[in-house]
Amino acid sequence: MLSGGRANAVHAHTNMAEPMELLCWGGDWDLPSVHTDSLIVLAYAKFSGAKLAVKSIDWTWRTITASVPQLHWEGSTVTEPAQILNFLRKQRFNADYELTAKQGADTMAYIALLEEKLRPALLHTFWVDAENYVNLTRPWFTSHSPFPLNFFVPGRQASLALSRILLTKAESPLLNITEVEGKIYSEAKECLNLLSHRLGNFHFFFGDTPTSLDAFVFGHIAPLIKAPLPSGQLQKHLNQLENLCQFCNTILKNYFTDAAAEKRMDCSLTATHDPVDANLQKLTQLVNKESNLIEKMDDNLRSSPQHRPHRHETKPSALASERNSPLLSKH
């Protein structure tokens, strides 16, 4: 017997006239997509139980200025991960259903941290670093874009990435990309350290159930872990944070087995963590402060319909085996 809310949620799902279609960049490197924003939406859909008809960009793509990913349903088009996730929540696909208001505030604060501290370094790694761009990024996007857009897409994306980095990070006296580079990589490493510290020995950031924060973190770190980068200083740092690597591997194995090979990531299980340093403590305090402000300013963080969502059935045996792994049992 289903409760009233549960029954209404099931009724809403079964009466969708057509499946929701997600247009995104395709997969490679054992990932369902190589694109951060596409990965965020794909992961959240899996976590919340939303069934999407996923369509990779192909020869039918006709505009260089279109935002990717795009969600299409019943004549509506939604872009940008945050807006797509809000749209899915309105359809009662809510991976954050069980979060408290405090956890909701933490989610918003950590997502803001990702965008401010980690995203610029990701953009630089894939689109501005000359070695990576020439040998990996440009060839990949050229080969996956339709003619004649394949001549323009990589260059335009690289220009947008550089502009975004300089707009957000080029403050006096750091006025050009060479001067900014050291700053963005230092901040990104501190951000990764904080995420690793926050995750600890849990499977996901709020326990055993993935939420939107897990989707955002996965979207940011998965390409960095899996891409065959010729120049990878940030990748090398991330590979030393074994719990983040295992976090990413858990999501790939339990939610994307059809899209990615089930093989262990090349992360050392003998890596050691440095004690919590002053920078990490400072960053933690900053995030906690922002979280507290968000919670005070908005007492209704989860304003979407609070009907218990469908959950993707993970593999119990997989999570059980990981619970007994050296990483989770060493403390």
Image (cartoon, rainbow, N blue to C red):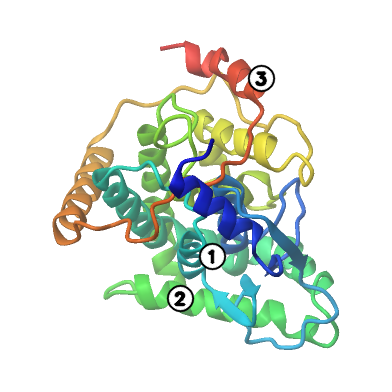
Circle 1 residues within 10 Å: few <14, some 14–19, many ≥20: some
Q: Is residue 331 above or below residue 101?
A: above
| Cβ atoms under marks 1 and 3 closer than 8 Å | no
Tag 2's secondary structure? helix
Q: Nearer the viewer, mark 1 or mark 3?
A: 3
Q: Is 67 situated above or below 32?
A: below
User: In terms of secondary structure, where does tag 1 sit?
Assistant: helix
Q: Amino acid at mark 3?
A: Ser
Give the residue pinned by disc 3. Answer: 317
- Residue marked by disc 1: 123
Question: Which residue corresponds to mark 2?
Answer: 164
- Name, please, the residue furthest toward the front: 1
Which callout, 1 or 2, points at the residue further toward the start of the chain? 1
Q: Is residue 48 left or right of residue 131?
A: left
Residue 222 shows up from this direction? yes
Tag 3 and tag 2, C-beta contact below 8 Å: no
Amino acid type of disc 1? Leu
Task: Give the position of the C terminus as an image quadrant.
Answer: top left
Decide: marks 1, 2 in contact (CB < 8 A)? Answer: yes
Does residue 133 lie above or below 294 as drawn?
below
Q: Position of residue 104 (x, y in %)?
A: 31, 49
Q: Compare marks 3 and 2 and give the one earlier in the sequence.
A: 2
- As rendered, which of 151 and 262 lies closer to the eye? 262
- For residue 176, say whether it is visible: no
Q: Nearer the viewer, mark 3 or mark 2?
A: 3
Q: Quadrant of residue 123?
A: bottom right
Task: Identify which residue is drawn at 60% across, 48% down.
Answer: 49
Horizontal side, residue 88 vs residue 25: left or right: left
Q: What residue type is disc 2 on?
A: Arg
